[in-house]
Each structure stands twice: as structure tokens, then as C-alpha cells.
Amino acid sequence: MIPHAPNRTKILAEGVETNAEVTKIETVHNEEINGVNPRKISFRYEINGRTNLASMETLSVEETADWKPGQQIVVRYLGDAATIPSLEPVDFPWILFLLMPLFFGIFGAPFLIYCIIRARNKLKVMKFGIVKKARLLSLAPVTSFGISWFFKTRFEANYVFQNEKSSEVYGSSLTADLVLLNEKKKGDEIEILVLPNQEMKSLILDVPTLKRIQSVV
């Protein structure tokens, strides 16, 4: 979309009025405002013997329904910018660009902190965790944010294992290991990594985790 909001007011106040010729009219199908697809009006006008080309997106769909290339219209120009005073422009929401950094600062920072803490805890388990046997309770699909694609599906493995006091401890871990998903079912024995003295922190020992361990240990 070609924004007109920043210049249009100044053009209307300080610009010069002149005649112009419509060269092209097209509907902007990839934009919709209040259920209306804007129309893009392209036109040309002369200034001191020089032909200038310009265009404008408008919501005045009914007013321009009968317009055709070659039609004469009145425009107002200032410098190299021009607009059609009789038509309603498509105003670009510039305020959104001002609010977007604030929005991501407020809502993105906690998420970023959470991801950093989670990554540090996972790295700690991989470096110092001990291998234990666990019993698989369930595998449930979980859709989460990914770097390689916007959304990726992984599985949350829920399991139970015994600690040093022979008490049952329940844990969960995310996995995308297709071998594990295809070969293991509820009740099967699996291997996990458990952080000593912090048994609530554990990871399922799948192929991706083994590869990461090799790179960090």
C-alpha cells in the first residue's frame, strides 16, 4: 500500500491545483478496510512541460465506479507528490509502528526471559544429569514456537520414575524424536536425565538430546 496520510494534508493546504488524466484504475485485492477493497488510481499531469506520474489508493469506490483511463480529473500537487482532493485516501495506520516496539517490549520481554531461563535449566540437566529408568505415561502433541518455522509440533512425554528414596516422581519433557514416537507407547520403559538434588528437573533421553549432550559436555 502507498501511504498518503503524511503528505496529503500539506499538499491540500499548500499545493497547486491542475488538470490530470487517469491512466489506470485497479482494485487492490490484497487489502481490505472495513470490508472494502481500495482502488488504486494512477494518473499523469504536466508541470512546465514535464509529465509527472502519480497514483493514489482510495476508499471512494462508488465515486470512481464509472472512471475510465483517459478521463480528465482535478489533482493538487506539491513538489513531486500529488493527490486527488475529491477522493477519500487510504490512511496508513502510522501509530501502529509507534506502538509495536512498546507492545513487544511489554509482552515480549517476559517471554524472552522465560525462554532464557528454560534453556539454561535444560543445559544444566544435560551437563550434570544422571541417567534413570522411567515409565512412560503419555505422549501428547504440543504446538509451540520454532525458529526454523513459525509453528512446529512436538510431543510432551509424561513419565514417572523412582528417586533415591524409592518414591515416585512425576516428570515431563518435550520431544520431537520420531523413533521414540513410533516405538514407544504408554507403560514402556524409557531413559531420562535427572538433575541430582533437583529431581523435578528432568529430560527425556532421546536422539536430539544425546546429540546436544555431545556438543556441550
Image (tube, rainbow, N blue to C red):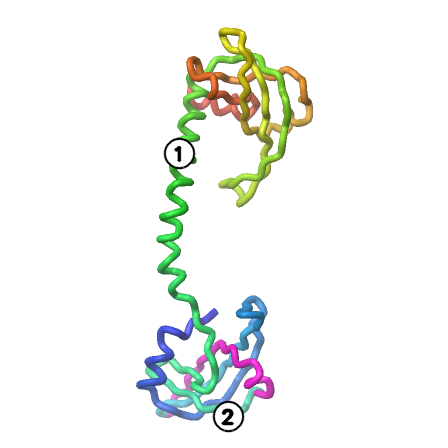
Residue situated furthest left in the rendering? 14
What residue does disc 2 label? 72
What residue does disc 1 label? 116
- Disc 2 vs disc 1: which is toward the camera? 1
**Residue 186 horizontal side relative to residue 125, left or right:** right
Against 157, residue 146 (above or below) is below
Local crowd size for mark 2, using a 10 Å CA cut-off: few (<14), some (14–19), many (≥20): some
User: Which image quarter: residue 141?
Assistant: top right
Q: Position of residue 170 (x, y in %)?
A: 55, 19
Magenta stretch: give its range. Answer: 49-67
Residue for point 42% across, 22% down: 216
Depth order, front residue of 44/185: 185
Q: Does the magenta portion include 108? A: no
Q: Position of residue 57 (x, y in %)?
A: 49, 76
Against 92, residue 114 (above or below) is above
Q: Position of residue 77 (x, y in %)?
A: 37, 85
Total marks in image: 2
Residue for point 60% across, 28% down: 177
Callout 1, which amino acid?
Answer: Ile
Local crowd size for mark 1, using a 10 Å CA cut-off: few (<14), some (14–19), many (≥20): few
Q: Position of residue 203 (x, y in %)?
A: 51, 22
Depth order, front residue of 98/167: 167
